[in-house]
Structures are given as structure tokens and as C-alpha cells.
Image (cartoon, grey):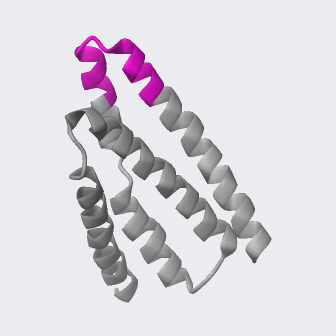
Amino acid sequence: MATALLVAAAGALGVLARYGLSSLGTDDAALWITMAINVAGSFMLGLLLAGEWGSNASRTATGAGFLGGFTTYSTFSVQAVMTVDGGRWGVAGAYVGGSVVLGLAAALAGITLGRALR
């Protein structure tokens, strides 16, 4: 039960962090802010899991809670579809391709760094 409460509290902080960052830009910047958030979250989750720091409860709260609330696949998907729907195929392609490639590269970098720092 204590871990669940930690996950909930950390999730609320992650959502607030995403909201705060997302509110910094205009509608045109929303895609790129979401991409930056998801790439940063991929790096941080890779680092967290590979580094094996802290207790299982703290890693779960940080990974599933904070980073789960911070990153967003649903917003990524809807933004991509809406961008295509708006006829901006090139922008949508850059957004989807960049998000996937940079997210994977960030996860790999986080895992690599986490392993090196253990």
C-alpha cells in the first residue's frame, strides 16, 4: 500500500511537470515540447532502471509514477494524427520519426550511462 501511495504522489508530480513544460509554448511548439518530454523521460527511465539505485519502492515510484505521469504516448499519438489531419504530413513525419528515433537513442544512452555508474 505504501508503494502505491508513493506512485500516486510521484505521478501527480510528473503530470504537473509535464503540464508546466507544455504550457510554456504555443500550439505550434506543442509537438516539439511533447517530443522533448518523451525523449527526456526515455533517457531518465533507462538511467533509473539500469542504475539500480534506491529501493524497489523508490524506483517504482519514480519510474511508474513520476516518469509515467511525465511522459505521454496518448498525446504523442493524438498530436501526430491531428497534424496529419491538418495536412502537415512533413511535420507529422518529422515528429513521429524524431520521437521514435530520439526516444530509442535516449533510452539506450540512459541505460548505458546507468550501467557505467553502478
Residue 66 image offset from top left, x and y in percent: 38, 69
Q: Say which of 95 and 55 sits in front.
A: 95
Q: In the image, what residue occupies the spot 42% across and 42% down?
A: 35
Position of residue 40 relative to residue 73, above or below, is below
Position of residue 80 relative to residue 73, above or below, is above
Q: Is residue 109 left or right of 7 when viewed as pictured?
A: right
Indicate the quadrant containing the C terminus: top left, top right, bottom left or bottom right: bottom right
Q: In the image, what residue occupies the spot 33% across and 66% down?
A: 14
Whether residue 89 is in magenta: the answer is yes
Q: Residue furthest right?
A: 116
Indicate the quadrant containing the N terminus: top left, top right, bottom left or bottom right: bottom left
Q: Quadrant of residue 30?
A: top left
Number of marks present in the image shown: 0
Whether residue 86 is in magenta: the answer is yes
Residue 2 image offset from top left, x and y in percent: 36, 88
Residue 31 image offset from top left, x and y in percent: 33, 36
Highlighted range, magenta: 80-95
Q: In the image, what residue occupies the spot 38% across and 69% down?
A: 65
Q: Quadrant of residue 4?
A: bottom left
- Magenta segment's dominant SS is helix
Q: Is residue 86 left or right of 101 when viewed as pictured?
A: left
